[in-house]
C-alpha cells in the first residue's frame, strides 16, 4: 500500500479486485457477478473495490459504508478513474439499508461479514434489496485466521489474538501507531472508543457463520473454504489454516 499516494488505500483495494472476484471463480465468472449488473458494495471503504467493479463490466455500483471519511475519499477516487457516472457512495448501515426492495442484481460483501454488528440482519437486508435471481456474495477471513484481529498494519504477528487479550492488543497497537499522523483514527476505528475490546470485529468464526446462516432461513447456493495457501489445503479442516470462507445466496421467487 502506498501511503504517499492520496488514494493509496483505494488503489490497494482496486488492485485486490481480481482476487476478490477470484474467490468465487470455481462456480461464478466475472461476467455472472458483474456484467451489466446493478451492484451493491457493502462496506466499500475507500471505494477501490467499488471502482474495480464499475471498471469491469458492472452497469452501476453503489458503495455503502458507515464511515463518512472513507466515502468522501471514495467519491474522489471514482472521479479520478473516470467511473463517477457509474458509481455512487451512500452513508448508511448494511443492517438498515436506505434502498427500496429489489433494486440490485449483485450484493458483494468482501471482507465485511466479520465486521458488521448484526450479520443476520445484514443478510436479510441484502436479500431484500436483491432482485429475483440476484445473488449475495460473501467472503471473509474467519476469526482464527492468522490475522483475524485485523491489526496487521502494526502487529504483523500471525495468530497473536489467540494468545493475548484484546485489552493488551489495543495497548500494544496504540503504542505502535502513536507516531503516525492518523494514529487516533486508526485506534478509534478498531476499538470504537473501547479500551478492552476490538469493536471493529465480531469474532466471526466458521461455526458462528454457519449458525447465522441457519437462522437466516436462506440456503446457500454455494459454500467453500479456501486455504491460506495451496500447499496448506490438507490443513483446511482447521479454521486456523482457512484463508477465506465463501458463501453465495441466490434470491429465488
Image (cartoon, rainbow, N blue to C red):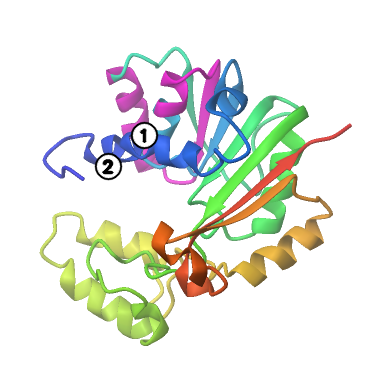
Query: Which residue is at the front of the view, 133 or 100?
Result: 133
- Sort mark 1 into few (<14), some (14-19) or many (20+) by Cα contacts within 10 Å: many
Q: Which mark is residue 48?
A: 1
- Give coordinates of residue 42: x percent, y percent: 54, 41
Is disc 2 placed on a helix, strand or loop?
Answer: helix
Is disc 1 placed on a helix, strand or loop?
Answer: helix
Q: Residue at x 64, y 35 (%)?
A: 98
Q: Earlier in the sequence, mark 1 or mark 2?
A: 2
Point out the image quarter for the N terminus. top left
Magenta extent: 52-80
Is residue 7 positioned above or below 120 on the image?
above
Q: Residue at x 79, y 56 (%)?
A: 216
The reply to whether callout 1 and callout 2 are in contact (CB within 8 Å) is yes
Is residue 69 positioned above or below 142 on the image?
above
Q: Residue at x 37, y 67 (%)?
A: 147
- Give coordinates of residue 52: x percent, y percent: 40, 28
Q: Magenta span has 62? A: yes
- Give coordinates of residue 180: x percent, y percent: 13, 59
Residue 144: in sight, yes or no? Answer: no
- Residue 170, quarter of the rendered image: bottom left
Determine the CA span between mark 1 and mark 2: 8 Å
Q: Residue at x 25, y 73 (%)?
A: 173
Q: What residue sits right under mark 2 in the picture? A: 9
Point out the image quarter for the C terminus. top right
Amino acid at each position: 500500500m502506498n501511503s504517499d499516494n492520496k488514494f493509496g488505500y483505494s488503489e490497494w483495494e482496486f488492485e485486490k479486485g481480481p482476487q476478490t472476484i477470484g474467490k468465487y471463480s470455481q462456480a461464478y465468472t466475472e461476467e455472472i457477478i458483474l456484467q451489466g449488473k446493478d451492484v451493491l458494495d457493502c462496506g466499500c471503504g475507500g471505494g477501490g473495490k467499488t471502482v474495480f467493479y464499475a471498471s469491469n463490466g458492472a452497469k452501476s455500483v453503489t458503495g455503502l459504508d458507515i464511515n463518512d471519511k472513507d466515502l468522501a475519499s471514495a467519491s474522489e477516487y471514482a472521479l479520478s478513474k473516470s467511473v463517477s457516472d457509474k458509481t455512487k457512495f451512500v452513508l448508511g448501515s448494511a443492517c438498515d439499508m436506505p434502498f427500496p426492495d429489489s433494486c440490485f442484481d449483485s450484493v458483494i460483501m468482501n471482507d465485511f461479514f466479520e465486521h458488521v454488528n448484526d450479520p443476520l440482519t445484514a443478510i436479510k437486508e441484502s436479500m431484500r434489496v436483491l432482485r429475483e435471481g440476484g445473488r449475495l456474495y460473501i467472503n471473509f477471513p474467519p476469526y482464527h485466521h492468522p490475522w483475524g484481529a485485523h491489526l496487521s498494519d502494526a502487529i504483523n504477528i500471525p495468530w497473536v489474538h489467540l494468545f493475548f487479550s484484546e485489552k493488551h492488543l489495543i495497548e500494544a497497537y496504540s503504542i505502535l501507531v502513536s507516531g503516525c499522523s492518523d494514529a487516533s483514527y486508526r485506534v478509534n476505528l478498531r476499538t470504537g472508543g473501547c479500551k478492552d475490546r476490538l469493536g471493529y470485529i465480531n469474532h466471526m468464526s466458521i461455526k458462528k457463520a454457519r449458525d447465522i446462516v441457519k437462522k437466516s432461513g436462506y440456503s446457500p447456493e454455494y459454500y467453500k473454504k479456501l486455504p491460506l495457501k495451496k500447499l496448506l489445503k490438507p490443513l483446511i479442516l482447521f479454521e486456523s489454516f482457512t484463508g477465506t470462507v465463501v458463501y453465495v445466496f441466490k434470491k429465488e421467487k
